[in-house]
Structure formats: C-alpha cells, structure tokens
C-alpha cells in the first residue's frame, strides 16, 4: 500500500526516486537480454551442435548481463537507503521540532514511552518501507508491462495467459492486506503501550517497592507482553498466508504457461528458441509481484508508523483545535525583525491577561494585570492553582494568552522572535533536570560559548565553588541521568549556576527551594540572592519566608491579583498575605 504522506516525503528526494526507477528499468532490460542469450546458447549447443568454443561470445554476454543485474541491484539499494535515511531524518527532526513547538505543558499529556518509541523504533521501520518495499513497488509497476511488450509480439497466447493471471496475485494480496493492515495497527498500539508502561514501571520502581506493588506490576507486564506476542503471531500468520497464496497462484500460472508452450512446441506451433525464451521469462514476470507480496508487511508497518507520526504532528498544543490559551509560539509565524533592547534591563507588563488550559478550557488566569519594572524583584504567592506557574509559563513562551497582552519593554510578546526572547531569560525550576555527563557539561548548557574561566568565576561568585570542590573530580565529576549521584541541594545549586552563566537580564524562579530542608535551603537561597543582583526577577514562592527580601509581592488567587505591595507593608495589613503567614501555609502549595 502507498501512504500519501510518505509518498509526499519521498517526492522531496526526486533524484533518488529517479535512480530507483532507472535501476529497476535497467534490471528488467538485463533480464530480457539474459533470457534471450541463454535461449540462444541452449539452441546453439543442443540443437545446432555448436562447439563450446563457438559460444564464447554468448557466455561473455551472459557474464556482462549478470554483472549489469548485480550492479543495478546494488545501485537501486544505494538509492533506496539514501531515500530512507533522508525521510527518517526529516520526520525525526519534524517530531522533535513539534515537541519543542507545543512545549512541555502539552507534552505532559503524551505518554513519554510512546513518544520515545515513535522517534526511535517507530521511524526505523521506514527503513524497510523505503529500502525494500518502495523499490519493489516501482519494479512491479514497470517490469510486467515491459515483459508483456516483448512477449506479445512473439506469442500472443503466452502474453494473454500472463495478462489474465497477473491481476489475480495483487487482488488476493489486497484482500489479505486489508486484514493484515488492521492487525498491524493493533500490533503498533500494543507495542507503544508496552514501551510506555515499561518505562513508567522502571521510573517508579522505588515507589512500587515501598508500596508493595512490584509483584502486581510484574503480572501486568506479563499480561501486556502476552498481548503483544498474540498480536505479533497473528500478523505473522497473515503474512504467511499471503506468501503462500502468492506462491501458489504464481506457480500454477507458470505451470499453465509451460503446458501451453509444450503442447504447441510438440505440435510445431512455436519454435524452440522462442518457447524456451518465454518459459524463462514466465517466472521473471511473476517475480516482482511475488517480491512485492514478501515486502507488503513492511508497507503495513511503514503506514502504521506514518499514521502515528502525522497524527502527532497534527496535534495542536493544549489538545485544542485552536491556538487560544494553549499554543506555544510558532517560530515560523513570529516576526524576527522585532526584538527587545535589553541594555537597560527588562520590564514586563501583563495587560488584562486571560489564560485557559486543555480541552476542558480550565481557567488559569482571568484578567490578570500587573507591571514589573526593570531591575525589580517580585514574588508570586498564593494557594495551589492560583496562577503562579501560569505566569512563568507565559513568560517562558510555553503558552500564549487567550486574551490580553504581555508587553516586554513595550513590545507585544506575540511579535517577538521566541528563540531570541528566551536567550534573555534565565530559569531555575523547582525540579531541574540534570543530564548524564559531567558537572561541567551541565553547567555549560546555560551558555555553550562560556569559557572555563568564566564558568569557574561564576561559580565562585555564587558560592558554588565549594560545592564543586567537594565532588570527587570537581567539574569533571560524572553524574547520572536526572542527577544520580547528587543530592537535591546540589542539583539545585547546579541549576542556579547554569542560569547564572546565561547572563540573562530576566530571572524566573519556580519554587526553587520547595523540596529542600532548611539547612540546604539556606545554602541555595544565598546562591539565589547573589544570582538575583542586577536582574529583573519573578519568583513563584513556595515558602513565604523566602519572599521577605523581595521588592514587591503579588498574592494570586483564582488567576487574579488579590493583594500587592512590599512584604513589610503587606504584613501590616489584615489581608491575604498576612492570613497566609499566620495560617502557616508556606510549606505547601505556595
């Protein structure tokens, strides 16, 4: 089967497609010439009594034709593999770019294991689709017509038999293929579910052990594995049935041709050389169709993979059919000509901003307005769901507001080059991600052009040099994925150093000390205070005591600013901030 999306992708590499078609055509010509030369050799030796030395030219021609077939086969495979590699690269790049486009908020709704399977094994099946199935598809469309064009002028009876029987093979292949297609899609879904589930189990093994649920999960894994085994065997049974059907009908058709030729040869209705030539061509006539049937399974896998890939690429951010409130800024649609002059710092204005999330259109912000002057440091506090993280997500460009405007130094954020804007932002999240590699590698993610001297100086200024010095190999110390080998405080210090190396004028803190004990929190807070010097800061605060050194505090409740002012001023009021402090809610959800 031909997937229109994959065909469109293949069409972008017209040179490779043309090479595949040309090689297939040349191989067909070589087959015709080889069969004719072989028929001439047999007639000359066995009927005309020619001496072996007299047939040297025929054998030389056979050798040349065999070499040509081998060469065209190798070139065809080379073109096909280059085509497959190009399509795989573009689709993998498109999937990764779409992941970036829709942002981390939308990606949370996707199963990580399934996405991982999609960009790895899922796209690898296209190797067989373009490397095996597509070239064979071209051969099936070209060679039988070429052969019939040679056969009919020599013997219309044989040509008619081939013309009548040939359509039976693809007809049966299509009938079985419809059945196989649904089973292949089912297999794909089960495999993706199994991959995602195994990843969840591995990541949550500690929790499962503590809760005593690891044995039950093993039973669940066994159940999913059994589903995959059963579906896979079903697909293989259909593939075997398809191959058996094709072989049976092609063999019967070749037998009919042989019997018809034999009867007319005995009766003198056809000469030996022509009959032998046609008999040699009969298997070659059906071979492309038989080979296509053998590769039909690859087409089903490729089509299933393409369906999932393009379904993901069509997925709008936030799971909605529009871009409102959930769409990450599209770099292709933004105006790179309009930038931000950050020399004098960054000022931010939220003007009546409303934001909703997801298909249910849950309201996160409702008419939010506030101003942040260049160099000012504000803390965002309030109950869980008040809108703190939504403000940060908007400033990071992960989502766009439903209505209202966000002004950056007077410029509408919708008009900014999002990549250029993010270079002006440093971010320290609540749970920073540390990649497998060295401490140096993770620090330099903040600024890949930073020198060793600048990195060490920055760590020294923030008080991180002592933390690094305690590690076994200093900056060369290797850490595992997710920061294995480091404590929570050390991971947070690493994230602070990474943010500092960006030298960005706007700093966003997303409850950066929420998961630390008081001893580690003090170390991290001291590093944060140093980092905040000379920067515009927006900090979502988990613990209210960490906001007391801010210039201003915004109390967010139900997506609105319920109270605003300096910390000391708010403490004197009998308002929301003072109530939160007195209620001792600083340790949860703030």
Image: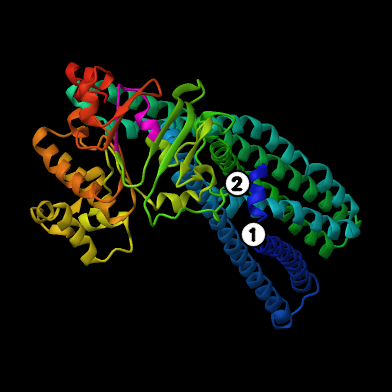
Dot 2, crowdedness within 10 Å: few (<14), some or many (≥20)?
Answer: many
Residue 2 visible in the shown view: no
Question: Is-magenta flag for residue 382?
Answer: yes
Q: Which is more toward the observer, 463 or 432?
A: 463
Question: Is-magenta flag for residue 69?
Answer: no
The residue sitting at 50% across, 49% down in the picture is 92
Quarter the N terminus occupies: top right
Magenta segment: 378-391
The residue sitting at 48% across, 33% down in the picture is 351
Q: Position of residue 303 (x, y in %)?
A: 60, 40
Q: Which is more toward the observer, 552 or 36?
A: 552
Q: Position of residue 149 (x, y in %)?
A: 85, 58
The residue sitting at 22% across, 33% down in the picture is 547
Q: Secondary structure at mark 1?
A: loop
Q: Quadrant of residue 294?
A: top right
Q: Position of residue 453 (x, y in %)?
A: 21, 66
Dot 1, crowdedness within 10 Å: few (<14), some or many (≥20)?
Answer: some
103 relative to 567, above or below: below
Instruction: Give the left or right position of residue 413, taking residue 575 as reference.
Output: right
Q: Which is more toward the observer, 407 or 289?
A: 407
Instruction: Give the left or right position of residue 455, taking residue 124 as reference.
Output: left
Residue furthest to the bottom: 53
Quarter the C terminus occupies: top left
Q: Position of residue 432 (x, y in %)?
A: 27, 42
- To which residue does mark 1 refer? 13
Mark 2 vs mark 1, CA separation in Å: 22 Å
- To which residue does mark 2 refer? 295
Is tag 2's residue or tag 1's residue first in the polypeptide sequence? 1
Residue 334 visible in the shown view: yes
């Amino acid at each position: 089967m031909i997937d229109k999306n994959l065909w469109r992708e293949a069409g972008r590499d017209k040179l490779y497609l043309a090479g595949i078609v040309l090689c297939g055509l040349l191989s067909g010509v070589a087959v015709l010439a080889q069969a004719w030369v072989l028929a001439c050799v047999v007639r000359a030796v066995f009927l005309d009594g020619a001496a072996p030395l007299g047939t040297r030219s025929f054998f030389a021609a056979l050798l040349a034709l065999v070499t040509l077939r081998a060469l065209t086969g190798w070139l065809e495979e080379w073109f096909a593999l280059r085509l497959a590699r190009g399509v795989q690269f573009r689709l993998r790049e498109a999937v990764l770019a779409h992941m970036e486009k829709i942002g981390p908020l939308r990606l949370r709704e996707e199963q990580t294991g399934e996405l991982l399977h999609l960009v790895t094994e899922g796209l690898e099946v296209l190797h067989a689709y373009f490397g095996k199935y597509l070239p064979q598809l071209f051969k099936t469309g070209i060679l039988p017509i070429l052969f019939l064009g040679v056969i009919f002028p020599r013997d219309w009876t044989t040509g008619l038999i081939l013309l009548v029987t040939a359509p039976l093979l693809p007809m049966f292949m299509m009938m079985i293929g419809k059945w196989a297609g649904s089973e292949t899609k089912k297999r794909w879904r089960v495999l993706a579910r199994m991959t995602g589930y195994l990843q969840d189990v591995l990541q949550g093994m500690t929790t499962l052990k503590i809760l005593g649920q690891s044995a039950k999960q093993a039973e669940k894994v066994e159940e999913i594995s059994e589903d995959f085994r059963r579906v896979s065997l079903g697909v293989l049974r259909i593939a075997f049935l398809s191959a058996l059907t094709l072989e049976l009908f092609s063999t019967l058709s070749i037998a009919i041709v042989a019997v018809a030729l034999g009867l007319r040869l005995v009766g003198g209705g056809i000469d030996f050389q022509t009959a032998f030539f046609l008999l040699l061509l009969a298997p070659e006539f059906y071979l492309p169709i038989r080979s296509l049937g053998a590769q039909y399974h690859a087409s089903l896998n490729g089509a299933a993979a393409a369906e999932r890939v393009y379904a993901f690429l069509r997925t709008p951010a936030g799971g909605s059919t529009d871009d409102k409130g959930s769409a990450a800024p599209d770099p292709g649609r933004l105006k790179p000509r309009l930038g931000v002059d950050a020399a004098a710092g960054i000022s931010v204005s939220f003007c009546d901003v409303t934001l909703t999330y997801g298909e249910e259109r849950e309201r996160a912000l409702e008419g939010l307005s506030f101003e942040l002057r260049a160099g000012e440091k504000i803390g965002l506090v309030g109950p869980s769901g008040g809108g703190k993280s939504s403000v940060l997500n908007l400033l990071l460009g992960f989502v766009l507001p439903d209505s209202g405007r966000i002004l950056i130094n007077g410029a509408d954020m919708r008009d900014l080059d999002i990549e250029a804007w993010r270079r002006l932002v440093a971010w320290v999240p609540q749970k920073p991600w540390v990649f497998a590699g060295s401490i140096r590698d993770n620090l330099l993610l903040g600024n890949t052009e930073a020198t060793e001297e600048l990195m060490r100086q920055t760590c020294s200024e923030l008080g991180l040099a002592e933390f690094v010095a305690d590690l076994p190999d200093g900056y060369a110390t290797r850490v595992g994925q997710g920061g294995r080998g480091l404590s929570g405080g050390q991971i947070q210090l690493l994230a602070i150093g990474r943010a500092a190396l960006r030298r960005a004028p706007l700093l966003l803190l997303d409850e950066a000390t929420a998961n630390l004990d008081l001893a580690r929190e003090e170390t991290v807070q001291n590093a944060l205070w140093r980092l905040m010097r000379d920067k515009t800061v927006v900090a979502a605060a988990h613990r209210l005591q960490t906001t007391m050194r801010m210039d201003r505090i915004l109390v967010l409740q139900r997506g609105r600013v319920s109270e605003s002012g300096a910390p000391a001023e708010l403490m004197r009021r009998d308002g929301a901030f003072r109530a939160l402090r007195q209620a001792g809610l600083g340790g949860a959800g703030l």
